Amino acid sequence: MASSMFFLGISLTVVCSFSLSMAFLLYVKSKKNIHLYISLLLANYLVELVELLYIARFCLPADTRYFDLIHFPVLRIFTTVSILLLDFLILLHIMSLKFHKSYLLLFAAVILFCGYTAWLPQTLLTVWLFYLPRQIYHFGYCVMFLLRRFLEKDEAVQKRMECRSVLILGVFLLSVSILLEDSLLISHIQIYFTDMLSVTERNFSENILWLFIMLYSTVYCMRELERSGTAKSPGVTERFETVSARTADRSGIVKSPGLANPAEMMKFPGPAVSRQSPAQPDYLTEIAEKFKFTPREIQILHGILCDKTTAEICGELNISIGTVKTHTHNRGVSETQ
């Protein structure tokens, strides 16, 4: 049994290493905070798994059920707080919330509680209390997610939270299983005791929870990497050609065969229009969004496309000729004299 549990720990370590490599590769490509949080979370899992394997192989005496059940307490406290903090940061990202400094008090409480229990006389009850904050905080995270989902009005945030509901539900159910298994271990130790305690110092449900999170993270990272590899970000020319095509459909402008950039498009006159100031076409709004035009630049562009002279644009917008020339020069536009 001990050998089986040891090889289970080895298998979890391999899976965790693979998940960590995928998450780190995704972070290197995207530079997004959420991918950094996932990488650090998996790194904490890996540290604790390696530590447990080391303890099982080199540190444990023949029988460890009644003494010295919490090895390397400082490292355990660090990994516990780190895991809870990173879980919380990932949850806040899913819910589109910001981290507030006051939240640090929650994790300071974990440090004090775990530090106090780690230096108490070591019993199975002490171990149960030492790991209890993990389950309590996970329950709190799940309740927070549930309330936020019902109260959230933003459809985009609701959709994102809905996509992660399986993850939150899985963590909640497995946390319940961990708490029940720990409680069973404490109250029926003579019947329940197996080699699992001496090998991993954790119960089987904890292994399942970690495996679930590792596999979920791996699938997520692979999908994100696939999207980043296949999604080609169109250049300015390609995006502007798309807008130009829409423009031609809506306003009847004929696209010149040699049109290759925004400046060329702006030089090409629009359809015949009167010298009055017609309503701004919708396609100019699209151009503003695509190429980050300011409202004043769009007004000047509108005047040019309406075949107005520089003097007419200045009079209509109540600006100087120098202002018009500055804007047209910055955008590479040829104004009508």
Image (cartoon, helix red, strand yellow):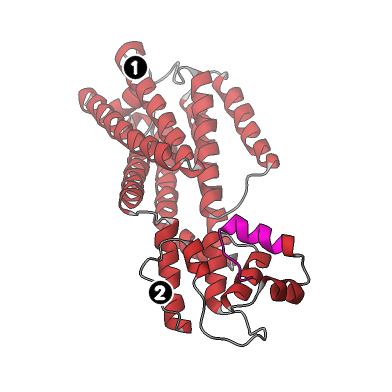
Discs 1/2, front: 2
| Kind of element beneath mark 2 | loop
Residue 306 numbered tag? none
Of marks 1 and 2, which one's residue comes earlier in the chain? 1
Task: Identify the residue under disc 1.
Answer: 54
Tell me which residue sits at (71%, 76%) in the image.
312
Tell me which residue sits at (28%, 28%) in the image.
9
Answer above or below: position of 322 versus 184.
below
Work out whether residue 216 or residue 334 is closer to the camera in this orientation and state it.
334
Rendering coords of residue 153 (x, y %): 59, 68
Rendering coords of residue 168 (x, y %): 44, 52
Whether residue 329 appears in magenta in the rendering, the answer is yes
Tell whether label 2 touches label 1 (CB within 8 Å).
Answer: no
Work out whether residue 101 or residue 244 is closer to the camera in this orientation and state it.
244
Corner quadrant of residue 116: top right
Q: Left or right? Give the position of 229 relative to 95.
A: left
Q: Residues within 10 Å of mark 1 (few under 14, many from 20)?
A: some
Q: Determine if residue 116 is in view.
A: yes
Q: Which residues are magenta?
A: 323-337
In the image, farthest residue toward the front: 337
